[in-house]
Image (cartoon, helix red, strand yellow):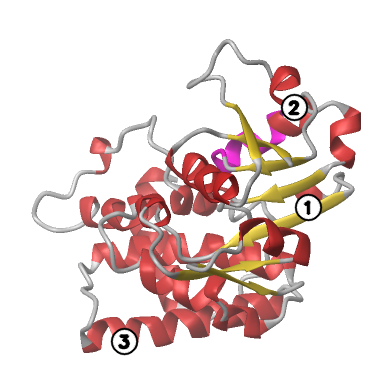
Amino acid sequence: MKITIIGAGAFGTALASILEENGNEISFFDPYKFPDISLISALESSETIIFSAPSNTLKNTLKSLPEEAKNLPFINASKGFLSNEPFLGLKKFSIISGPSFSKDIKAKKTTTLTATDFFTKKLFETPWLKIEISHDKKGILLCGTLKNIFAIYSGSRNIKPATKEFRDFLIESIHEMKEILKANGCDENTAELACGFKDLALTTSSENSRNYRLGKRLTGDNADSSALDSSETIEGLSALKSLKTSGLIIPKNLPILEETLTLCKPLL
């Protein structure tokens, strides 16, 4: 199958390695990495589109997408969305999400991801990569965004894995995630899937996470919010910036979310 991946960063190329292993042909659209390849050219003969670019580029990408391409299966692999509304104009929209640093995928480290249909499962599943199915699209997107916000908090507290503090943090984070999912009409049990708990545990315990590193930069003796690289995509911060205008219902008494908002206030 010919598949076009939008976004040729570390994660997009890692996904390509899986798809090629499963016998697919890959083309990339990425104006920064491949400025000579247009979207039209990258989509030639394509049967499926995978979006793996920063979430804030989706709007312009969809505007540029030819109408006939909007009828193709469109799989979102990017995180940072507070609803599935941006994707509603697509005929065959699905999601793949979960605990997956690019280097771990390229190393074929055993893991599980969550997908929203069996087509996506068939594309990506390998002996080392298991795919579970959930149809809660909005819930999956929210989990992928909330875990980045919670990673900022974890970094600010310099929380380390395999500690009581980390276990307590995970319990409270999952509670807050479930409360937000329920308040917005999602299945709270989605938070228990790979796209929720496992992704949360990975992202909030590792300095490989840009969100975790941001939390560390905003606290401690050398705290300096001005040191933030404006060109760096930090999904949790982007989500916090759009929280008020997103229409997302935020229940009361969510201390981790509230403290993270306070911590990031100078950047919002």
Q: Amino acid at mark 3?
A: Arg
Q: Amino acid at mark 2?
A: Leu
Task: Identify the residue shown where x is 56% and y is 52%.
Answer: 80
Query: Considering only order in the chain, which callout, 2 or 1, is on the residue closer to the N terminus?
Result: 2
Which element is circle 1 on?
helix
Give the labeled residue for mark 2: 43
Give the labeled residue for mark 1: 85
Spatial separation of the CA atoms under disc 1 and disc 2? 24 Å
- Quarter of the rendering containing residue 113: bottom right
Spatial separation of the CA atoms under disc 1 and disc 3? 34 Å
Task: Identify the residue shown where x is 56% and y is 34%.
Answer: 7
Q: Main secondary structure of the magenta part?
A: helix
Q: Is residue 120 above or below residue 48?
A: below
Spatial separation of the CA atoms under disc 3 and disc 2? 45 Å
Q: Position of residue 156 (x, y in %)?
A: 25, 63
Q: Position of residue 95 (x, y in %)?
A: 69, 58
**Figure quadrant of the N terminus:** top right
Q: Which residues are magenta?
A: 53-60
Q: Is residue 6 above or below residue 20?
A: above
Q: Amino acid at mark 1?
A: Glu
Give the labeled residue for mark 3: 167
Task: Identify the residue shown where x is 59% and y is 38%.
Answer: 56
Q: Is residue 175 above or below residue 74?
A: below
